[in-house]
Image: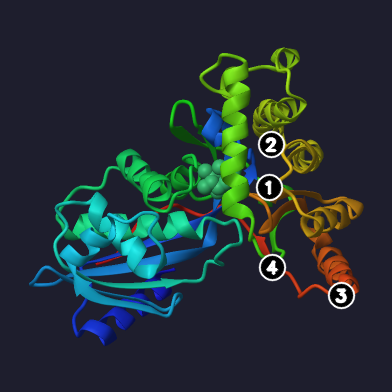
C-alpha cells in the first residue's frame, strides 16, 4: 500500500513537476450480505477490499484545474468556473462530470492538480464509483485546509450519486469505504446512518472469502436499480411505513400486489439474514453463514430479480462444492461473493473455469480476500 502511494506520488510529480499535498487511498467494498436494504432503512454487512483508488492532489495558483487518471485514460484541463457550469446540466457524465460534481459540492475549493490511479474493477459491483468520489472529496478538502469529518463526507459522496449521476442509491457504499476497519466486517444500519465494526474472523477458522467478477455487462443496471428503489418505496407505502426496515414478515399479508410482496419479502428477510450472519460469525458457525449466503442469493434472484443466468450458474457451481455464494452489490451482472474453507480454492478455480469454458463465457476474475482491509485513509502528503 505504501509502495503504491509512493508510485502515485511519483506519477503526480511526473505530470505536475511538484509533489502532492495530499494522497488518499479509497478501497473498494464488498457486501458480504445485505443487498438492496440500505435505501429502505435496513441492515448490511460489508468489508473493504485490498484493491483501491488513489487520489493525489496539489494546489494551483489560479482558479484552474488539471486532472488526469491512469484508469480512465482521461485528462481535464480547464477552469473551476467551467466545472461549476458543467455541474448545472445533470446527470453529469465522464471524467469531467465527476470533477464538476465534487467542485460544485465543495464551494470553497480553488484550483487544483489531481492525479488518480486505481486497480479497482469498474462495473464489477465493488463500488469503484463511491471510492473515486470519496477519494476526490477527501483530497480536495485537505487541499482547502478543511478538516475531514467522515459522516458528512459520506453524505456528500451519496449526493454525487443521487443528484449528479442520477442514481438513487443508499449509503451502503460510502459508509463501507469511509468507516471500514482492518480485520473487521462493518455492520451498517441505514436507518441510523451508522456503521460499526463487528467480528468476522473467517481467516482464523481456515475459511476464505472470494470475489468472482463474472465479467458480465451491467447494461440494465441503472434502470433496474431505479425500478427496484421505486418498487420498494411502493411496498413501504402500501404498509403506511416510512421504510421497510421497520416491517416484519407478518406485514406481508397486508400488501395486495404480489410483485410488491416479493420485493418487500426480500428486504425483510435479508435484514434478518444480516443479523443472523453477525451472530453466527461471532460464534464461529461458518457453515451457517454459508447457508445464509445461499439463502440471500435465492432471495435476490427470485424475490428481488436482480440476478442473471451467469450469476446464478456461478453461484450454483460454488454451492455444489460446498461453498456459500451470493450476488453482491446492485446485481444485474457484476460479481459473486463466496465464503468457504480455504482448502477448497483449487476446486473452486477448476470448477469455475470448467463452467465458463463450457458456456463460452470469457474467464472470470477470481480474487481471494485474505482478510478485511481498512477504509479511506490519507497515505501521503
Ligand atoms: C449499489 C448502491 C448501494 C446499494 C447496493 C445494493 O451498490 O450504490 O447503495 O443499494 O447497490 O445493496
Give the residue at mark 4: 215
Real-space Cα separation, disc 1 to disc 4, in angstroms: 26 Å
Numbered label attached to residue 202 = 1
User: Which tag is nearer the camera, tag 3 or tag 1?
Assistant: 3
- Residue 24 appears in the figure: no
Residue 223, compared with residue 190, is above or below; it is below
Task: Kindly give the residue lying farthest to the left in the view shown.
Answer: 61
User: Which tag is nearer the camera, tag 3 or tag 2?
Assistant: 3
Residue in the picture at 39% in, 70% down: 2
User: Which tag is nearer the camera, tag 4 or tag 2?
Assistant: 4
Numbered label attached to residue 281 = 2
* Quadrant of res 367: bottom right
Q: Quadrant of the N terminus?
A: bottom left
Q: Is residue 188 left or right of residue 308?
A: left
Real-space Cα separation, disc 3 to disc 1, in angstroms: 30 Å
- Secondary element at image label 4: loop
- Secondary element at image label 1: loop
Question: Tags 4 and 3 in contact by the CB under 8 Å rule?
Answer: no
Real-space Cα separation, disc 2 to disc 1, in angstroms: 8 Å
Residue 62, compared with residue 263, is above or below; it is below
- Secondary element at image label 3: helix
Question: Tags 3 and 2 in contact by the CB under 8 Å rule?
Answer: no
* Quadrant of res 16: bottom left
Residue in the picture at 80% in, 42% down: 294
Q: Is residue 37 left or right of residue 269?
A: left
Residue 15 location (% of width, % of height): 27, 84
Question: Tags 2 and 1 in contact by the CB under 8 Å rule?
Answer: yes
Residue situated in front as seen by the camera: 113 or 275: 113
Amino acid at each position: 500500500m505504501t509502495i503504491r502511494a509512493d508510485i502515485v506520488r511519483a506519477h503526480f510529480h511526473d505530470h505536475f513537476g511538484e509533489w502532492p499535498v495530499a494522497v488518499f487511498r479509497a478501497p473498494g467494498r464488498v457486501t458480504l450480505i445485505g443487498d438492496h436494504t440500505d435505501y429502505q432503512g435496513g441492515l448490511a454487512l460489508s468489508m473493504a477490499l485490498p484493491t483501491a483508488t488513489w487520489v493525489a492532489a496539489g494546489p494551483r495558483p489560479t482558479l484552474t484545474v488539471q486532472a488526469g487518471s491512469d484508469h480512465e485514460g482521461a485528462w481535464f484541463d480547464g477552469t473551476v468556473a467551467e466545472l461549476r457550469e458543467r455541474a448545472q446540466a445533470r446527470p453529469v457524465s465522464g471524467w469531467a462530470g465527476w470533477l464538476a460534481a465534487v467542485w460544485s459540492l465543495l464551494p470553497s475549493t480553488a484550483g487544483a492538480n489531481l492525479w488518480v490511479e486505481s486497480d479497482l474493477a469498474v462495473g464489477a459491483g465493488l463500488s469503484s464509483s463511491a471510492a473515486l468520489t470519496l477519494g476526490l472529496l477527501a483530497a480536495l478538502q485537505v487541499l482547502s485546509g478543511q478538516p475531514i469529518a467522515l459522516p458528512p463526507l459520506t453524505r456528500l459522496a451519496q449526493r454525487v450519486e443521487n443528484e449528479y449521476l442520477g442514481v438513487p442509491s443508499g449509503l451502503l457504499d460510502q459508509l463501507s469505504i469511509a468507516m471500514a476497519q482492518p480485520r473487521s466486517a462493518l455492520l451498517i444500519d441505514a436507518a441510523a446512518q451508522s456503521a460499526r465494526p463487528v467480528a468476522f474472523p473467517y481467516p482464523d477458522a481456515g475459511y476464505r472469502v472470494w470475489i468472482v467478477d463474472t465479467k458480465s455487462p451491467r447494461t440494465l443496471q441503472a434502470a433496474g436499480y431505479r425500478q427496484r428503489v421505486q418498487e420498494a418505496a411502493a411496498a413501504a407505502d402500501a404498509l403506511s411505513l416510512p421504510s421497510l426496515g421497520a416491517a416484519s414478515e407478518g406485514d406481508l399479508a397486508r400488501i395486495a400486489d404480489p410483485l410488491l410482496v416479493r420485493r418487500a419479502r426480500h428486504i425483510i428477510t435479508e435484514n434478518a439474514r444480516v443479523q443472523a450472519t453477525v451472530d453466527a460469525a461471532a460464534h464461529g458457525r461458518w457453515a451457517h453463514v454459508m447457508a445464509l449466503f445461499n439463502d440471500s442469493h435465492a432471495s435476490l434472484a427470485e424475490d428481488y430479480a436482480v440476478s442473471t443466468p451467469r450469476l446464478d450458474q456461478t453461484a450454483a457451481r460454488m454451492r455444489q462444492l460446498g461453498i456459500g455464494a451470493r450476488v453482491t452489490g446492485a446485481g444485474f451482472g457484476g460479481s459473486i461473493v463466496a465464503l468457504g474453507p480455504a482448502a477448497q480454492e483449487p476446486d473452486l478455480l477448476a470448477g469455475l473455469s470448467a463452467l465458463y469454458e463450457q458456456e463460452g463465457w470469457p474467464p472470470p476474475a477470481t480474487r481471494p480476500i485474505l482478510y478485511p482491509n481498512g477504509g479511506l485513509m490519507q497515505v501521503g502528503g
